[in-house]
């Protein structure tokens, strides 16, 4: 492949942005300090996390519309302002007012990070149209490492100066780094003589009516419980199972490293092996990891959680490429956003499960969700129009 001029800069800018968008992967290290600083109960702090992830899913659809209509720079710029502003508002939010905190922090931070994600992913895929898995993998690896970066940041700044200072400092870093990255993002120049679109380029109204979309969005939702049923309480789970309390945050760091590895390895492999075979491995890995996590004690908790984050993040990084394989690149931003609605559904289901189910039942729910997700993607078939198969290698053919 002849590399387009400017393509490496797009990947670098996207990676810089994604390094600051992995709040869900690191929420376990946020939860207890937030409870102490803002006088929240465990349920309230978990709701902060659930609304943040749900806002991400809903915001992806809006951000995708912005990205397709005004370009990645516009969408990422607004995402930077919303996400950075949410952290700054969190720094000033009064203690004991969980609904206000949800409005001031969870909603704008979740929606803002969602504006950034489709902008980065769709832009990178357009620059690397014949190596989409690699492009999403490189930027996704940075998102995986975000958990390790945020853990160190919260433990360092938050541990020394408190969570209000930590939120304010993170807001400033987000505005600076993501703002600079957003300024670099742009769509590639059109190829001379290239058609505006192809038969595969379904607009969102047509996409959401397909069986493929419904199965994909269900599969995305079902990938969440094996990780999100436990991640807000991860530090407490690790401590309860024999890990020294001061070492428990290493579970988040190790999980973040595994997440980065999954986001890099799985989409790159899917360029060669196909999207569906890799996704089969992802959901099988989530099922095995769920059983391992249910039995793990001491340091094995970190190993089991790393296995789950590797496959969860790896699957999330394959989804954008499968999405464009099935539905085309022209509407990649908004179509990915509608796919990400599954994240919102999975997040809210996981929150409800974490509050209502005892630990043993949570483990069963995680394993059954992984099995059901595998079935969903096994049923996804290449999209055909007028009797012509549009999807090519990567959709399991």
Image: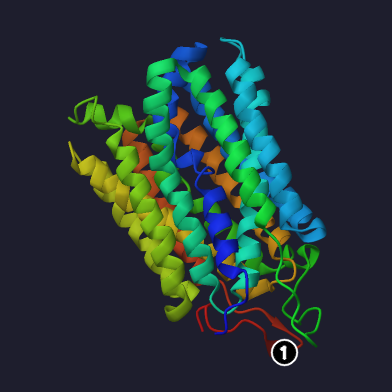
In this rendering, position of residue 63 left or right of residue 29? right
The residue at which mark 1 appears reads as 387
The N terminus is located in which quarter? Answer: bottom right
Is 276 located above or below residue 60 in the figure? below
Locate residue 89, reporting x and y percent: 65, 22
SS for callout 1: loop
Residue under the image location 23 percent in, 30 percent down: 247
Locate residue 145, reporting x and y percent: 41, 48
Is 395 located above or below residue 365 in the figure? below
In this rendering, position of residue 379 left or right of residue 364? right
Locate residue 167, reporting x and y percent: 54, 25
In this rendering, position of residue 365 left or right of residue 62? left
Front position in the image: 214 or 151: 151
Front position in the image: 169 or 118: 169
Q: Judge whether residue 274 can be spotted in this image.
A: yes
Q: Judge whether residue 341 can be spotted in this image.
A: no
Graded by Cα atoms within 10 Å as few (under 14), some (14 to 19) or many (20 or more), the crowding at tag 1 reads few
Front position in the image: 213 or 331: 331
Locate residue 278, reporting x and y percent: 42, 70
């Amino acid at each position: 492949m002849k590399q387009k001029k400017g393509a490496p800069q797009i990947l670098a800018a996207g990676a810089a942005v994604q390094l600051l968008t992995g709040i869900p992967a690191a929420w376990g290290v946020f939860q207890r300090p937030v409870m102490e600083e803002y006088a929240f109960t465990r349920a309230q702090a978990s709701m902060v996390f659930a609304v943040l992830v749900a806002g991400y899913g809903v915001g992806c659809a809006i951000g995708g519309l912005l990205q397709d209509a005004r370009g990645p720079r516009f969408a990422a710029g607004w995402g930077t302002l919303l996400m950075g502003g949410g952290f700054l508002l969190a720094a000033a939010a009064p203690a004991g007012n969980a609904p206000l905190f949800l409005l001031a922090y969870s909603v704008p931070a979740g929606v803002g990070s969602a504006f950034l994600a489709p902008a980065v992913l769709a832009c990178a895929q357009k620059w690397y149209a014949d190596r989409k898995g690699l492009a999403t993998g490189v930027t996704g690896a940075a998102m995986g490492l975000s958990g390790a970066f945020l853990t160190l940041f919260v433990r360092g700044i938050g541990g020394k100066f408190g969570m209000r200072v930590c939120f304010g400092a993170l807001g400033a870093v987000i505005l600076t780094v993501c703002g600079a990255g957003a300024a670099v993002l742009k769509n590639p120049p059109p190829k001379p003589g290239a058609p505006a679109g192809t038969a595969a380029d379904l607009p969102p109204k047509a996409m959401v009516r397909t069986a493929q979309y419904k199965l994909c969005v269900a599969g995305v939702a079902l990938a969440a419980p094996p990780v999100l049923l436990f991640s807000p309480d991860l530090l407490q789970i690790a401590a309860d199972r024999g890990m020294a309390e001061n070492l428990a945050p290493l579970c988040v760091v190790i999980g973040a490293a595994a997440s980065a590895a999954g986001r890099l390895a799985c989409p790159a492999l899917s360029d060669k092996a196909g999207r569906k075979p890799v996704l089969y491995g992802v959901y099988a890995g989530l099922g095995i990891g769920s059983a391992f996590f249910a039995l793990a004690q001491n340091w094995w908790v970190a190993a089991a959680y790393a296995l789950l984050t590797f496959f969860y993040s790896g699957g999330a990084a394959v989804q954008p490429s499968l999405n464009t394989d099935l539905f085309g690149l022209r509407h990649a931003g908004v179509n990915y956003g509608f796919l990400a609605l599954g994240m919102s559904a999975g997040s809210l289901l996981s929150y409800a499960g974490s509050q209502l189910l005892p630990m043993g039942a949570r483990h069963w729910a995680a394993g059954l969700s992984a099995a059901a997700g595998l079935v969903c993607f096994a049923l996804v078939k290449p999209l055909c129009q007028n009797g012509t198969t549009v999807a090519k290698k990567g959709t399991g053919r």
